[in-house]
């Protein structure tokens, strides 16, 4: 190891972010997909998908200190505890989009300068309207109907996503492979080399799981208007019933209320359980009446004629 390598090694050990700053200007350099993933993995030490608590404190200290040519490590940092509290408050206000008090990978992607194409994979200016759209995309890219999005299927998805975002096809095959590998490192929580339903759902977010609203948790009385809103949300073709991807989207949202990690088989079993409870009509559809029964049960409220 030569002198320069030793210097970089020491600085990296003292302050991980320093290696990504220009030595002269102290500005952050554009990160490749792999470099961004290295930063994420370094600070998300417990691998729970968030930089939070002491992880967040450590990141903020090193992020600020790395901009100072003489400020090498946390133990030598000029950042006081009071300054850290103020900095964290300003930082979270600017970058904690969902205001949950922690930084997820999508929020970190907005903070760090990255390759434009890779950054586009984290920028969903128009998140999916509902899980119905998500299930349609799932069906399209799970081309072998295995119940998983494998690496080659994920690569096809990312290629189409970039093509749609930029309206041009200028991403090399090597870059696509790098992006695919990186996204698997990020979202493949159980490290089986493919994405199950719950993992893909984190990559491709839905605007809101409507069923998470307080009204469905028994805090308020469900109204006919509430039920009509839910029915309209899932009955995308307005044919008077919830079926096919509409039904699977609804069931996915229901399943998320009770299970954090789930796959396609979980969804199938959940579908059988739920539909058996409402007198499944064997046509694979849910009517307004059946939806009402499910929502009342979810909100732990008696049917209207018993209220």
Image: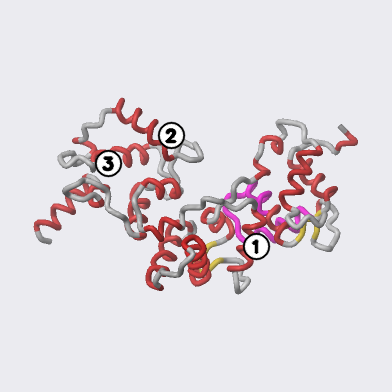
Work out which residue is located at the far top of the displayed protein and give it.
82
The answer to whether 131 appears left or right of 78 in the picture is right
Magenta range:
252-275
- Label placed on residue 93: 2
Q: In the image, residue 51 lies at what x, y percent?
A: 40, 43
The answer to whether 119 appears left or right of 243 in the picture is left
Q: Inspect this view and state whether residue 192 appears.
A: no
Image quarter where the N terminus lies is: bottom left
The residue identified by callout 1 is 136
Nearer to us: label 3 or label 1? 1
Nearer to us: label 2 or label 3? 2
The residue identified by callout 3 is 62
Q: Inspect this view and state whether residue 126 appears.
A: yes
Q: How many marks?
A: 3
Q: Are marks 2 and 3 in contact (CB under 8 Å)?
A: no
Residue under the image location 78 percent in, 46 percent down: 294
Residue under the image location 48 percent in, 56 percent down: 189
Work out which residue is located at the far right of the displayed protein and give it.
305
Q: In the image, residue 83 lies at what x, y percent?
A: 30, 28
User: Which residue is at the front of the view, 194 or 152?
Assistant: 152
Residue under the image location 31 percent in, 25 percent down: 82
Disc 2 or 1, which lies upstream in sequence? 2
Label 2, label 1: how far apart the Cα atoms are: 35 Å
Image quarter where the C terminus lies is: top right
Q: Characterize the local packing of mark 2: few (<14), some (14-19) or many (20 or more) Cα atoms within 10 angstroms.
A: few
């Amino acid at each position: 190891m030569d002198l320069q390598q030793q210097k970089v090694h020491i600085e990296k050990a003292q302050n991980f972010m320093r290696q990504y700053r220009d030595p002269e200007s102290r500005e952050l350099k554009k990160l490749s997909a792999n470099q961004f993933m290295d930063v994420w993995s370094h600070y998300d030490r417990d691998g729970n998908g968030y930089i939070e608590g002491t992880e967040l404190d450590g990141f903020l200290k090193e992020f600020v200190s790395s901009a100072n040519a003489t400020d090498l490590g946390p133990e030598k940092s000029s950042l006081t505890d009071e300054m850290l509290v103020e900095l964290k408050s300003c930082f979270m206000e600017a970058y904690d989009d969902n205001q949950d008090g922690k930084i997820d990978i999508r929020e970190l992607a907005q903070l760090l300068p990255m390759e434009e194409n890779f950054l586009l994979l984290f920028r969903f200016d128009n998140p999916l309207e509902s899980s119905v759209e998500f299930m349609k995309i799932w069906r399209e890219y799970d081309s072998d109907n295995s119940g998983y999005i494998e690496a080659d299927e994920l690569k096809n998805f990312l290629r189409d996503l970039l093509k749609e975002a930029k309206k041009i096809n200028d991403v090399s095959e090597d870059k696509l492979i790098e992006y695919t590998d990186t996204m698997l490192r990020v979202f493949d929580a159980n490290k089986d080399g493919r994405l199950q339903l719950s993992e893909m759902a984190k990559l491709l977010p839905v605007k809101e799981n409507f069923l998470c609203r307080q009204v469905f948790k028994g805090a308020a009385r469900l109204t006919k208007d509430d039920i009509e809103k839910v029915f309209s949300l899932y009955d995308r073709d307005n044919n008077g019933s919830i079926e096919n991807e509409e039904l699977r989207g609804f069931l996915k949202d229901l399943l998320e209320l009770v299970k954090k990690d789930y796959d396609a088989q979980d969804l199938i079993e959940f579908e059988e359980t739920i539909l058996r409870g409402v007198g499944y009509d064997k046509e694979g559809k849910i009517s307004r009446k059946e939806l009402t029964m499910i929502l009342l049960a979810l909100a732990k409220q008696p049917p209207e004629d018993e209220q």
